[in-house]
Amino acid sequence: MRLSAGSGWRRGALAPAAGALPALSFPAPSLWWWAYVALVPWLLLLRTAGGGRRAAVEGWLGGTGFLLATHHWLAPSLHVFLVVVAALMGLLWAPWGWLVRRLLAGAPAAGRAVAAVVLVPSAWLMIELVRSWEYLGGPWALLGASQWQVPPALRLASLGGVWLVTVWVVAANTALAVLVAVPGARRAAAAA
């Protein structure tokens, strides 16, 4: 997937849509397996951003899309203010977008790819920790919570709670994005 850096409006529309994709893994429709691939389009979009600033904007827009999709049930209470709250909270994903581009842009070497599989999930976890602060609304729509009916994920949660499940899910998405985007990584995985 190669998107040109100059198609700003198109990329700006794709970012919230890509950010909203993980919402399908939460209850109703509860496609738990989708969580393991849902972030890949957003990661691929961010890695091809024209620069760090553009990646931060697309991280913010994707975070806004994620929050709108996962918090849609608040619309009857918040009305148009749901968009305002989602846009403000979506800013938490701006540094994450920058980090994704920094680690995955171009053809990352093995060291950068491994760093991405560790650091990208860790940064997502930091976002969820901040969002879980009670004065910011509490722990709604944590990515690891999408795995609430999956026995292996529940065993993982017994070790590190929903936080470890979140890290696992984002790490799986990041590894898959590396395999999809970097031909050398696919060859190395096939050789192993």
Image (tube, rainbow, N blue to C red):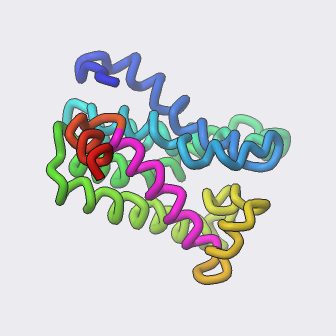
Residue beneath the point at 25% across and 19% down: 4
Indicate the position of residue 118 as horizontal and vertical percent values.
Answer: 34, 65
Stretch of the chain drawn in magenta: 162-179
Q: Quadrant of residue 55?
A: top left
Residue beneath the point at 30% across and 16% down: 7
Indicate the position of residue 3 as horizontal and vertical percent values.
Answer: 30, 21
Q: How many marks?
A: 0
Q: Nearer the viewer, residue 120 or 79?
A: 120
Compared with 184, 121 (above or below) is below
Residue beneath the point at 59% across and 37% down: 20
Compared with 10, 60 (above or below) is below
Q: Nearer the viewer, residue 71 or 21?
A: 21
* Left or right side of 25 for 176: left
Q: Quadrant of residue 114?
A: bottom left
Whether 99 is among the magenta residues is no
Indicate the position of residue 104 as horizontal and vertical percent values.
Answer: 25, 45
* Left or right side of 138 for 185: left
